[in-house]
Image: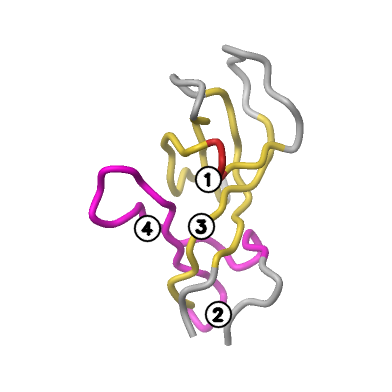
Amino acid sequence: MTGSDVTVSCLVTTGMFSSEYLVKVESAGRVLWEGPADRELVFPDKDLEVKEDKYVRGRIVAHFLGWSYGKKSVIVEVASDGLAQGRRFEVPAEMVKAQKLPA
C-alpha cells in the first residue's frame, strides 16, 4: 500500500519568506534533502525567532511512496509548488512517524 502521509525528522530554520521554513533532512551525518517548505507542512519542536540562523529539530509532512531495502528505509516525497512532482528521497525507517506505516 502506498499513498499515506507521514512525518519525517528534520532540522528547521527560518526561510527567505514568511510562508516557508528552510528544512534539512540528515541521516548519519549526510544531508538527504534540503530546501524550502511551506510552514503548513513543517512542525518545529520550538518557536523560531525571525531571521534566526540556527536550526532546531522538527518534523516535515511527506507522502509515503514505498519501502526499500527490506523495510529498513522508506521512500517519501515532500510537496513542492510549481513542480510536476515533489522532491523524493529515501530515509531510514526510524526517522518516519505515522499512525501505522503501510504494510
Answer few, some or many: residues within 10 Å of disc 2's Cα (few below 14, many 20 plus, some between 14 and 19): few
- In the figure, is residue 98 to the left or right of 73? right
Can you identify the residue that label 2 sits on? Answer: 71
Is 80 magenta? The answer is yes
For residue 97, side relative to residue 81 (left or right): right
Residue 41, horizontal then vertical, whole percent: 55, 45
Q: Which residues are magenta?
A: 68-97
Q: At numbered mark 2, what does the secondary structure look like: helix, strand or loop? A: loop
User: Which comes before the other along the chain, label 4 or label 2?
Assistant: 2
Q: Determine the residue positioned at 28% across, 57% down.
A: 85
Q: Please, what is the three-letter code of the amino acid marked with disc 4?
A: Arg
Which quarter of the image is occupied by the C terminus? bottom right
Check whether the beta carbons of the residues at disc 2 and disc 1 lie within 8 A of each other.
Answer: no
Q: Where residue 48 sits: x, y (%)?
A: 68, 22
SS assignment at label 1: strand
Marks 1/4: CA distance? 12 Å
- Give the residue displayed 41% in from the left and 58% down from the top: 89
Q: Name the amino acid, label 3.
A: Ala
Q: Report the Cα–Cα distance between label 4 and label 2.
A: 17 Å
Q: Viewer-nearest of labels 2 and 3?
A: 3
Answer with mark 3 or mark 1, whichever residue precedes in sequence: 1
Determine which of the numbered discs, if any, sits on residue 62 in the image. Answer: 3
Q: Is residue 47 above or below residue 43?
A: above
Front residue of 60 and 25:
60
Q: Could you tell me the amino acid type at mark 2?
A: Lys
Q: Which residue is mark 1?
A: 25
Pointers 1 and 4 in contact (C-beta within 8 Å): no
The alpha-carbon separation of the residues under discs 2 and 3 comes to 17 Å
| Local secondary structure at mark 4 | strand
CB atoms of marks 3 and 1 within 8 Å = no
